Amino acid sequence: MGSDGAWNTAVSFVTNTNWQWYSGESAAGHLVQMAGLTVQNFVSAAVGLAVAVALVRSFARTGTDRLGNFWVDLVRGTLRILLPIAALAAVALIAGGVVQNFTGPTEITTLAGGTQSMVGGPIASQESIKLLGTNGGGFFNANSAHPFENPTAWTNLLQIFLILVIPFSLPRTFGQMVGDRRQGVAIVAVMASLWGAAVAVISWAEMRGLGAVPQLAGGAMEGKEARFGAAGSALFAASTTGTSTGAVNSFHDSFTAVGGGVTLLNMMLGEVAPGGVGAGLYGMLVLAVLAVFLAGLMVGRTPQYLGKKIGRTQVTLVALYILTMPALLLVGAAITAATPALVDASVQDPGAHGLSEILYAYASATNNNGSAFAGFAAGTPYQNTALGLGMLFGRFVPIVLVLALAGSLAGQRPGATTAGTMPTHGPVFVGLLGFVVLVVAGLTFFPALALAPIAEALL
């Protein structure tokens, strides 16, 4: 790799993004895949867990400046959660037909009489943590659409389960640690509602398939793997963009305008439905703090969340957290869209769809997702550098702000609960929090979405 490509790849895997501008099977050997990329799949996911647990401790503890030890949490997350589950998942994937060997390229004769070089490797071991850790970087360029990575409809469902299992489990951890399971139920209810809505809309759009050809085919099958069908691809797409995974079993660039637009919106929501390993929980808790603050303004009371007062310091940190990703995304996308040379080098499709490709690339990078609209050529020196910066700042600036928020909350003593204190475990709060998630993204990104997927859908 050139220096810009190596920089982009290093940042990509360290930040849990796993954006790949290259073809994995041709650009990285077994040693790089195992000792480099797979190790970062574990460590980057464990970092997200450590940050989430630190924020949860700030709600559970009072009058202290202690949020735990990062290195202890990193080791616990890796050895007690990620490694055991990934090992079992790898065995299950091998049983389902995923390749795990150390062979070099094998020349085979095709049905047409030609020859093709097939690459093997330690695929199942990387596949399991790629999904469990919401990483997404595939051993092959085709990612989970490749039969060596994802052979059957059964393994496809297992991979979706691995993507979702930890993000949907962490709200229970939150409820346990703060001593009120209802708090965790409220958080997971919002996550599940947003994820379910995304699955429903993408499935409807892809299975309905606007136009005579898609309708005759029983769905918009361009770019999809026939083994999984439109429904299996839609479920995977909603899950991989609702989390920070970025693995794909179909080309999102070939989705209908509505289906592709929902995958883009999933990332623009901040990937909190249910979000990445750790990142989804702390992202949703930051939005919960904002929801409580807004509720306090409505009733004229000092807002509190789990007994911790939400004041100027907390709201400032929340505001900076919420603004970081949109600023990186929109500025990065605008520079590319406004520079003819960059458009010519990277964007293959004109009009609204070309803008969607640009927005998707920067949404994926700044949200540490890693999936892409395949029509966007990212392997240029500029895009490798710019997207690398987006990944770097999109990951670590929010983490710094979350830890600052945690520090400001941990030192507080719990406030008294009064009649004006909004309960944060009931349906009213669940509805308010879901509304805040949608409005924050809607007000920020609606103009860009109106020029890209919405405009394309109306053509």
Image (cartoon, rainbow, N blue to C red):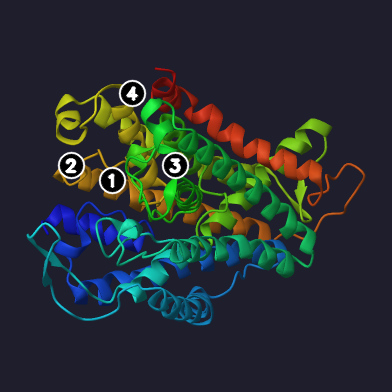
Neighbor class of circle 2 (other Cα within 10 Å; few <14, some 14-19, many 20+) is: some
Q: Is residue 379 visible?
A: yes
Identity of the residue drawn at 51% across and 62% down: 277
- Separation of disc 2 and disc 4 at Cα? 22 Å
- Separation of disc 1 and disc 3 at Cα? 13 Å
Estimate the x, y position of residue 255 in percent, counting from the top left.
39, 37
Question: Is 299 located above or below residue 140 in the figure?
Answer: above
Identity of the residue drawn at 61% across and 46% down: 196
- Separation of disc 3 and disc 4 at Cα? 22 Å
Estimate the x, y position of residue 363 in percent, counting from the top left.
39, 41
For mark 1, give the secondary structure: helix
Residue linked to disc 3: 325
Residue linked to disc 1: 387
- Separation of disc 1 and disc 4 at Cα? 21 Å
Q: Is residue 43 visible?
A: no
Viewer-side residue, 382 vs 30: 30
Mark 2 belongs to which amino acid?
Tyr
Determine contact: label 2, label 3, CB under 8 Å: no
On residue 445, the disc is: none
Displayed quadrant of residue 223: top left
